[in-house]
Amino acid sequence: MNDLYVGTAIFLLSYAVIVTERVHKTVVALVGASLMLVLKILTQNEAFHSETYGIDYNVIFLLIGMMIIINVMKETGIFQWMAIKSAKVAKGEPFRLMVILSVVTAVTSALLDNVTTVLLVAPVTLLICEALEVDAIPFLITEAIASNIGGTATLIGDPPNIMIASKADLSFLDFIYHLTPVVIVILIAYLVTLKFIFGRSLHVSDSHKERIMAMDESTAITDRPLMVKSLWVMGLTVLGFVFHHQLHFQPATIALAGAALLLLLSRAEPHKILEAVEWPTLFFFIGLFIIIGGVVKVGLIKIMSEWVLSVTQGNMFATSMIVLWFSAFASAIVDNIPYVATMNPLVIEMAKGIWPNLQGTDLLHNPDLMPVWWSLALGACLGGNGSLIGASANVVVAGIAEKGGRPITFMRFMKYGMPLMIESVLISTVYIWLRYYAF
Amino acid sequence: MRARDVMITEFDKISPDASLFDAAAIMRESRKGTGEGGIPAVVVLDGGRLVGIVSLTDMLKAILPPYLLQDTHLAHVTWDGLLESQCKRVQDKKVRDIMTRDVVTVKEDAVLAEAAEHFLSRHIHSIPVLRGDSVVGVLYLYDLAKRVFAYCQVGAS
């Protein structure tokens, strides 16, 4: 009983400090994790080696592998090439450009992490908007939103999906099969909505369009042999993800193998590439996993799941809907990574409460439970669009805009982000109902 | 030879509240007619106290669009007239917004090797020279290099 109070206190305090942003979230997570260990709520052995309570290395190494691949790839200039090519395909027509850039960002975000995608797309967007002499802010906001939508589509697109896939033992193709269709619908609805918002308000003179047409996108590519190699490795890696389940590999194995192959082929200086891996993000995950492991062990998550069950009375459609909408609004306000880290074991405890006789994948992949996982993924990923602080991609875009002297205010983002988030979650609601409950 | 022997005492100064354009005007006139050169830098004094320095690099960094610094692949696809058009964007900028605050200084009796080390390790071209807390001159890389070259001639003692 004592452990329950201590573990709960560490958990609540850590999350509260993370929300205030007074101390860097990685530091908070590591302090919380250390407390769990020092106060013997969790043993080191459990934290490092237990599948139930410990660090999820599948998530950590999948992230590391993809970060390495991206770090090599972004040196080649291919993303800048794509953006400039997009502008030329759009012939400098601003709304067409907005649509093409949104689609490019969404597709890239489905394969790479969202923050990296916008970090690559935002500066070149500023350049293109400068050339066209058109306000860059609508373009930057629509790209951030497109990146969050696109990231929802695949297992590797957004950290919440990586975490859910690992905990629920879902494969890359599971995500393609269950999430990609609805994300495509959401993306199309999003583009149609953009037409209503921006379709008539963006104008550019012909002489400025010529500036775009005069750009030589091939000069953006600084290392063509490296680009060819990294495209091959990226293609192979994606292929590996597609078949990882049949081949009985975890996704992290695929990502690490891809990263190793690219490091070997590129002859890139490992010191430089590995230094650019986002260690603070990875240690944030490590700390969170230990904190969550602690509260799972002391039984807090079980108590929370019993409370959720008492509300939903075991009605799985109601559970899916609550998870979807609650996740969306929660992720708009707080970081969706700690949120999903908490929700994963909660969903599992809840399932154990409903089906006490089931175990392993029989439990995790129970047909009645599957829509709850998809609702969690959709809510947590799409919710990030609700506010400027809802997703890391939004924060990064705002930072780039501010440096460029064009700050994006909290309210200006919300004006577009919140209605678009609600639109996407409404579409998800209809999808979940139609696909899993209506027939 | 010490810093005081190589520094120039008629150095350019400006208030932190002056505009970027004022700093540019000072730089245009800097060392004109002296027959001397070097990359200009303006010492920023707030009521006589050293608060910063504006170098030509600081000016360029303020004028160049930030995204070009963030993404090194983009410089190739810019167009003629981009840099010129940026001046409108920065016309309201004050010296305090663009100056380097962490100023490298030397004491007036510092030996030249100390200054040379600062020039190289900090990638700067001018160093304010202090007597106590007040700036008494500016040591230019250009002037220091001229002295060094003088020693590198055949027959120099």
Image (cartoon, grey):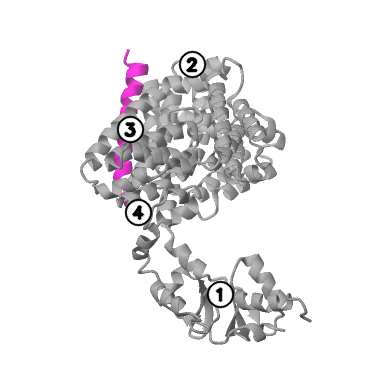
Say whether residue A336 is visible: no
- Could you tell me which chain the residue with mark 1 belongs to? B
Q: Nearer the viewer, residue A257 or A19?
A: A257
Pointers 2 and 3 within a single chain: yes
Q: Magenta segment, which residues?
A: A412-439
Q: Secondary structure at mark 4?
A: loop
Quadrant (top left, top right, bottom left, bottom right) of the N terminus of chain A: top right
Q: Tag 4 or tag 3, which sits nearer the N-term? A: 4
Say if the magenta span includes residue A97: no
C-alpha gap between disc 3 and disc 1:
59 Å
Amino acid type at image mark 2: Asn
Q: Tag 4 or tag 2, which sits nearer the N-term? A: 2
Question: Disc 4 marks which residue?
Answer: A409
Q: Tag 3 or tag 2, which sits nearer the N-term? A: 2
Question: Disc 2 marks which residue?
Answer: A366
Considering only vertical position in the picture, is A62 above or below B3?
above
Instruction: Residue B38: give its label.
Output: 1
Q: Quadrant of residue B96?
A: bottom left
